[in-house]
Image: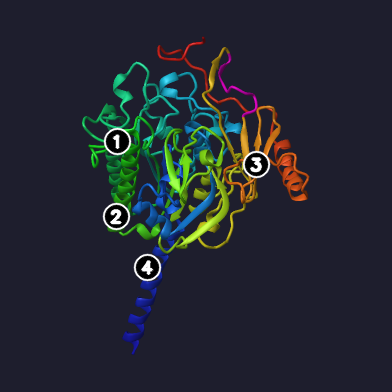
């Protein structure tokens, strides 16, 4: 009798220990954020694309949550800095594109507190961090350890096109990639996603027993459009674009399969999105209607990004959400999922939607979202500056959207429910619901500074490749 009770007690205590271990794993789930480069919803079949099939991405949507109202920024670097910092570009100064390796001068300065990244915060919460893909906002020639300084333990990053270094111009084949182990070098004959994905999967295998925060800003399908290893005969721009999207889908499948084999799929939250819409000139079809790419523009096709969240057992499956979210929300969401808190002295604009994706709430805390971005920045005698003191932007809720000019004036109002293509400007409408919406957005605009911040970076010695004043 005593022996039986002792065995029962030992079994019970062992069960508690196992449960505690499992709870600890779930309390700090792995987080993998995948962000494609230049791809709108019209090229994913889970969003209704009719010209292509993306079964692995569709599986993430079917088995998780697919968002209809998620905002990126209109172009590359504003999206990247927003994701990393949880701040809108008007606060960081990155309201317009600046390709640091090509143009020099400005850079994403790790010494500035306002540039604190989600990676640094996740490391502080016990996570191992890794980034692979495309960085673009620093020059690895000057800052070979910049990813470490921004909070990443390991990385494999295409350096960007470094002016004066022709080898770095190749972003798809024989890519010039920087890693902490080997510095910057060309991977002859290799396809960029293969190099980056292999590095990421190696990291996952090595750190599978620890909580991981993984960032994969994939370089595809940004031009130049090329034939892929799977479809070497693709000739036209359209065929090559489709081939690149299919290769992305294949890559997603490889990552998911690896997570399953390592038995960590059920504690890995995958968030999938893109940095902006498809390049102009590339047209897809949804519901029989042609959808033209509008990268760089603040139309819904330019900034309303595909956004999917998936984790079997943690994230509810088969959910189509109209919840509002934008890229500033990722940092606080990651930190809440990690069980951490945002430092009290760190200003961010984002709001965590962790309770929504964990099935604890039915909506995000957002009443509105914003996207801001222009063309390229310019070099002045005072440093890199944006074209306008107040950058053009768009703000929306679940029904209405306004366009705000560089003069800080609302110039367009659209009822997105009935006018998703934004053809009818309701700015001068006398209908009470339109006036009410306009007042709501005007209050938001009035709360913003009259001038956007400038990029926060420490001036340094001029380099031969730095852009010169014209």
Residue at image point 62% right, 38% down: 394
The answer to which of 143 and 231 lies nearer the viewer is 231
- Residue underneath mark 4: 18
Task: Identify the image quadrant of the N terminus.
Answer: bottom left
Q: Picture coordinates of residue 399 (x, y %)? A: 64, 50
Identify the mark nearer the N-term, 3 or 1. Answer: 1
Q: Using the rendered view, name the quadrant where residue 390 is placed.
A: top right
Identify the mark nearer the N-term, 2 or 1. Answer: 1
Circle 2: is it few (<14), some (14-19), or many (20+) Cα within 10 Å?
few
Q: For marks 4 and 2, give the CA distance.
A: 25 Å
- Residue underneath mark 1: 192
Residue at image point 49% right, 42% down: 118
Range drawn in magenta: 382-391
Q: For marks 2 and 1, give the CA distance.
A: 20 Å
The answer to which of 416 and 273 lies nearer the viewer is 416
Q: Picture coordinates of residue 449 (x, y %)? A: 69, 31
Task: Tell me if residue 458 is in the magenta stretch.
Answer: no
Up-down relation of residue 162 to residue 219 (above or below): above
Q: Secondary structure at mark 4?
A: helix
Identify the mark nearer the N-term, 3 or 2. Answer: 2
Residue 158 placement, left or right of 326: left
Residue 57 placement, left or right of 319: left
Circle 3: is it few (<14), some (14-19), or many (20+) Cα within 10 Å?
some
- Residue underneath mark 3: 424
- Residue underneath mark 2: 257
Identify the mark nearer the N-term, 4 or 2. Answer: 4
Q: Mark yes or no: residue 138 visible.
A: yes
Between label 3 and label 1, give the one nearer the viewer: 3
Q: Residue furthest front?
A: 288
Q: Secondary structure at mark 2?
A: helix
Identify the mark nearer the N-term, 1 or 4. Answer: 4
């Amino acid at each position: 009798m005593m022996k039986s009770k002792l065995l029962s007690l030992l079994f019970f205590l062992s069960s508690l220990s196992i449960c505690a271990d499992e709870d600890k794993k779930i309390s700090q789930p792995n987080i993998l954020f995948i962000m494609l480069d230049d791809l709108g919803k019209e090229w994913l079949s889970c969003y209704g694309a009719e010209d292509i099939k993306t079964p692995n991405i569709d599986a993430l949507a079917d088995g998780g949550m697919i968002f209809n109202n998620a905002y990126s920024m209109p172009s590359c670097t504003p999206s990247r800095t927003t994701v990393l910092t949880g701040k809108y570009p008007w606060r960081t100064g990155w309201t317009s594109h600046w390709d640091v390796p090509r143009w020099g001068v400005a850079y994403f300065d790790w010494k500035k507190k306002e540039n604190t990244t989600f990676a640094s915060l996740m490391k502080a919460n016990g996570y191992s961090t890794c980034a692979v893909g495309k960085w673009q906002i620093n020059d690895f020639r000057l800052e070979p350890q910049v990813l470490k300084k921004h909070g990443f333990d390991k990385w494999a990053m295409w350096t960007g096109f470094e002016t004066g270094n022709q080898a770095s111009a190749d972003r798809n084949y024989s890519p010039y990639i920087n890693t902490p182990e080997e510095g910057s070098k060309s991977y002859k004959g290799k396809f960029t996603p293969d190099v980056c994905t292999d590095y990421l999967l190696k990291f996952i295998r090595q750190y599978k027993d620890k909580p991981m925060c993984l960032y994969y800003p994939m370089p595809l399908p940004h031009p130049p459009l090329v034939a892929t290893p799977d479809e070497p005969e693709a000739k036209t721009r359209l065929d090559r674009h489709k081939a690149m999207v299919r290769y992305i889908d294949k890559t997603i499948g490889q990552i998911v399969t690896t997570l399953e084999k390592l038995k960590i799929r059920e504690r890995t939250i995958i968030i999938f999105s893109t940095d902006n819409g498809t390049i102009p000139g590339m047209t897809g079809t949804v519901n029989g209607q042609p959808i033209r790419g509008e990268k760089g523009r603040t139309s819904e096709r330019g900034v309303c990004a595909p956004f999917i969240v998936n984790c079997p057992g943690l994230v509810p499956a088969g959910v189509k959400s109209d919840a509002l979210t934008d890229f500033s929300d990722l940092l606080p969401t990651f930190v809440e999922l990690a069980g951490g808190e945002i430092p009290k002295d760190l200003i961010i604009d984002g709001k965590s939607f962790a309770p929504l994706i964990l099935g604890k709430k039915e909506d995000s805390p957002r009443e509105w979202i914003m996207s801001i971005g222009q063309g390229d920045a310019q070099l002045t005698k005072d440093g890199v500056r944006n074209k306008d003191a107040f950058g053009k932007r768009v703000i929306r809720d679940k029904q209405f959207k306004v366009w705000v000019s560089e003069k800080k004036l609302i110039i367009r109002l659209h009822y997105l429910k009935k006018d998703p293509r934004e053809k009818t400007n309701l700015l001068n409408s006398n209908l009470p619901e339109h006036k009410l919406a306009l007042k709501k957005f005007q209050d938001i605009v009035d709360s913003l500074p009259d001038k956007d911040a400038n990029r926060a970076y420490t001036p340094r010695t001029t380099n031969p490749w730095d852009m010169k004043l014209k």
